[in-house]
Image (spheres, rainbow, N blue to C red):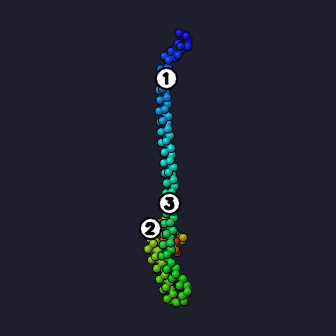
Amino acid sequence: MNEEQTTPVEETAEAPETVKEEKADKKKKKKADAETEALRAELESVKEQHARVLAEYANYKRRTEQEKESIGQFAKSEILRQLLPSIDNLERAVDAPDGPDYRKGVDMIIDKLHEELQKLGLEEIPALGEPFDPEVHHAVMREDAEDVETETVTEVFQKGYRFGTRVIRPAMVKVAN
């Protein structure tokens, strides 16, 4: 036998073990590649889902802002619509001749305006003769009053109003020392 023939026989003796390892390595690599591709596909799917959720949230936020603005505009227009008759009556009062009926007409307009505002939820803050409350009264003057308890409102310069529990404008008052 010559050398050429013995070499392949020697190589083939080692080859089955190396071939098995190479095949196992290739199998592991294919499996790892397949797992990597599956993970990449899953990651892309999650990224798409995330992008959709972000877009949906942005749309939701925009839509709710528009709805809030629309509701606010509607509420304002309803309030203004309810006040228009009182404004019309005030304009008529300006054109009316002076006299005892004039004062009566203006008082009726004021009463109607107060009625409409009460329907909308506006309440007058009681002040005259009430104990001073800095949450709802704004004291601009103090006076020494002998027949009144201290810290009692003795005069109202400007009425105060609240809407529900929120003070819209505190009553401007004079308070006894």
* Residue that carries the numbered disc 1 in the rendered image: 19
Tag 1: Cα neighbours inside 10 Å, few (<14), some, or many (≥20)? Answer: few
Identify whether 131 is placed above or below 4: below
**Where's residue 175, x and y in %?**
50, 71
Q: Tell me if residue 124 comes above or below residue 30 in the rendering.
A: below
Tell me if I can see residue 172 in this picture.
yes
User: Of callouts 2 and 1, which one flags the residue occurring earlier in the amino acid sequence?
Assistant: 1
Residue at 48% across, 45% down: 45
Q: Which residue does the numbered mark 3 point to in the structure image?
A: 63
**According to the image, label 2 marks what residue?**
164
Identified by mark 3, the residue type is Arg
136 or 118, nearer to the observer: 118
Looking at marks 3 and 1 on the same chain, the residue that comes earlier in the sequence is marked by 1
At label 1, which amino acid type do we have?
Answer: Val
Name above or below for residue 39 compared with residue 163: above
x and y percentages locating residue 91 in the rendered image: 54, 82
Residue most extreme to the front: 1
Looking at the image, do the residues carrying marks 2 and 1 touch, with CB atoms under 8 Å apart?
no
Question: Are the residues flagged by discs 3 and 1 in contact, CB closer than 8 Å?
Answer: no
The mark lying in front, picked from 3 and 1, is: 1
Name the element at disc 3: helix
Tell me which residue sits at (51%, 53%) in the image: 55
